[in-house]
Amino acid sequence: MKDISAKIQQLKKEKKAIILAHNYQRPEVQEIADYIGDSIELSRKAMQEQDAEIIVFSAVDFMAQSAAILNPTKKVLLPTLGARCPMAQMLTVDEIKRAKKLHPNAPVVVYVNTLAEAKAESDICCTSANAVEVVNSLDADTILFGPDRNLAEYTAEKTGKKIIPLPEWGFCPTHLLFQPEDVTIIKQQHPDAVVMVHPECSAEMRKTADFIGSTSKMCKYAKESTAKTFIVGTEDGILYRLRKENPDKKFIIAYDGAVCPNMKLTTLDRIYVSLKEEKYEVKVPKAVAEKARVALERMFQVKS
Ligand code: 13P
Ligand code: SF4
């Protein structure tokens, strides 16, 4: 492991590359990353990156695409072609066009977990960290929102606006695995535990939560909280960071099968090959990228 990490560090230097990794990445990948974060933090970092010539994006397709859209002069590499977020495939351009015809006055908000073509067809993007603020920033009471139905419902609860989900039942297969019963059982053994849940979880699961937020917001919450034990309702990769940053606190995942297979496709070996052979370069057609960039930049203008 040390050997491959050292080789990656060497290649990084030679090629002026940086590695950005999502909070769900494998521990060893988090260890060699220059920056770890949630979707919005990683997009911001990619946009602000001045010095690197290559950005290796250890995450899934839509996050690397956003980096390529926001930083068109850099080479953005996705180490594993198969690292695709299934939820991002759930919202098609046709679906958005159909909905726009039915609701011509409703702005279209797309979660960053979408492909570039869907972003290009939208008015503004959001992440799980700022969906409420993005929707509140719009001068409309009815909003078209996709693809995550749970995030759409959570945002509707928080904003009081009418949110029409696109498609009707978009979901994250990993967050769907969490059940409130699991929290009840863990709570019997750890009655003082604080429950943190990602908004991609079901409404029943969100009802168990003391805190709902993006992956990095959970990290911040755990650091600042005086609680000693936390039940975590999101993908298991985050536990590594939570435990590393809070060695005196206890973190229990609400369901230990909640592993995103797509996020776990990125390994150190694959990062090494990716850097060495400079593959797989993420390319977004210029016309699509320009429109998608507008939607992403509008999101950055919203204070959250
Ligand atoms: P975050 O933006 O909260 O990191 O979430 C991304 C994601 O894919 C959640 O499943
Ligand atoms: Fe996509 Fe869910 Fe994996 Fe996040 S956890 S990348 S939403 S499949």
Image (spheres, rainbow, N blue to C red):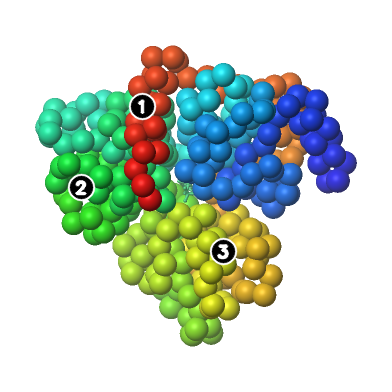
Q: Position of residue 226 (x, y in %)?
A: 54, 77
Where on the picture, by quarter, is residue 297? top left
Residue under pointer 3: 256
Q: Which of marks 1 and 2 is nearer the N terminus?
A: 2
Amino acid type assigned to the residue bearing label 2 in the image: Ile
Viewer-nearest residue: 48 or 32: 48
- Mark 3 against mark 1, which lies toward the viewer? 1
- Please tell me whether residue 212 is drawn above or below residue 248 in the rendered image: above
Q: Position of residue 263 (x, y in %)?
A: 57, 44
Amino acid type assigned to the residue bearing label 1 in the image: Val
Q: Does the residue labelled 1 lie within 8 Å of ligand 1?
A: no
- Gap in angstroms between the C-alphas marked 2 and 3: 32 Å
Q: In this view, does 212 lie to the left or right of 142?
A: right
- Please tell me whether residue 131 is drawn above or below residue 6 in the rendered image: below
- Gap in angstroms between the C-alphas marked 3 and 1: 39 Å
Q: Label 3: few (<14), some or many (≥20) within 10 Å?
A: some
Residue shown at 18% from the left, 56% from the top: 160
- SS type, badge 2: strand
Q: Is mark 3 within 8 Å of ligand 2?
A: no
Viewer-nearest residue: 174 or 8: 8
Amino acid type assigned to the residue bearing label 3 in the image: Asp
- Mark 2 against mark 3, which lies toward the viewer? 2
- Please tell me whether residue 116 is drawn above or below residue 194 in the rendered image: above
Residue located farthest toward the top when viewing the structure as drawn: 286
Residue under pointer 2: 163
- Gap in angstroms between the C-alphas marked 1 and 2: 22 Å
- Mark 1 against mark 2, which lies toward the viewer? 1
Residue under pointer 1: 294
Q: Earlier in the sequence, mark 2 or mark 3?
A: 2
- SS type, badge 3: loop
Residue located farthest toward the right when viewing the structure as drawn: 3
